[in-house]
Image (cartoon, helix red, strand yellow):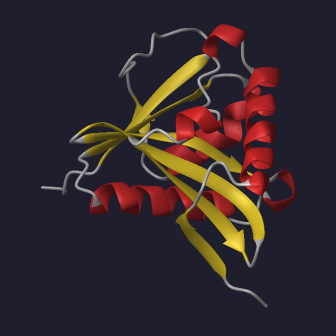
Amino acid sequence: MPEAEISIDDPEAEDVRELLERHLAFARLNTPPEDVHALGVDGLVDPAVTFFSFRVGCELLAVGALKELDESHAELKSMHTAEAARGGGIGRAMLEHLIAAARARGFRRVSLETGSMPAFTPARGLYESAGFEPCGPFGDYVAGSSNVFMTLSLEPSP
C-alpha cells in the first residue's frame, strides 16, 4: 500500500485544479459572493504562497497553502479535503503540517478566514482543536456577518 505524503505541489496540475474547483464551488455555494476569499489557481501561484498536497500514491486527497503576509505572519489558505476522504484525519494532518511549516519558516503567527455558516462548522472545530482563537480581521479583510477570523500564536510558551 502506498504511503501518505504531504509535499509542496503545483496548483496548476490537472488533479489539483479539479480539487480546487470543488473547493471554490463549496465556498460559492455556502458564502455570499462578496465574502468568498478562497484562492483559485492564479492566487496560489503567487510567490508569497507555498502550496501543499496530501497524496496517497498518486491519489490527491487534500490541499492547503501558506501565504506569507509579512516576515512574522502567515495566512492559512485553500484547506480542502476531498469529500470521499473526509473524517479520516487527513484535514488534521494537513493542518498540522502547515503549522509545522510556518513554525519552521520562523513565522510567529498563523491566521485564517473561514465562513460563519453551518457548512463551515467542521472546519472551525478543526481549527479550534488545533489552538486557533477568534481574532479581528487581518491583512485586507473586512469583518462581515459571514466570515470568522482566527489566529494561532507560534511564539514559545513562557
Q: Nearer the viewer, residue 95 or 11?
A: 11
Q: Is residue 4 left or right of residue 94?
A: right
Q: Could you tell me which quadrant the C terminus lies in?
A: bottom left
Q: Quadrant of residue 90?
A: bottom right
> Residue 131's spot in the image, x, y percent?
42, 48
- Give the residue displayed 58% in from the left and 65% down from the top: 93
- Residue furthest to the bottom: 1
Q: Quadrant of residue 53?
A: bottom right
Q: Is residue 22 left or right of residue 37?
A: right
- Residue furthest to the right: 84
Q: How many marks?
A: 0
Q: Is residue 74 left or right of residue 43?
A: left
- Residue furthest to the left: 158
- Give the residue displayed 59% in from the left and 48% down from the top: 126
> Residue 120's spot in the image, x, y percent?
69, 33
Q: Nearer the viewer, residue 3 or 99?
A: 3
> Residue 137's spot in the image, x, y percent?
40, 18
Q: Nearer the viewer, residue 43 or 78?
A: 43
- Give the residue displayed 64% in from the left and 9% down from the top: 34
Q: Nearer the viewer, residue 50 or 61?
A: 50
Q: Is residue 53 above or below residue 76?
A: below
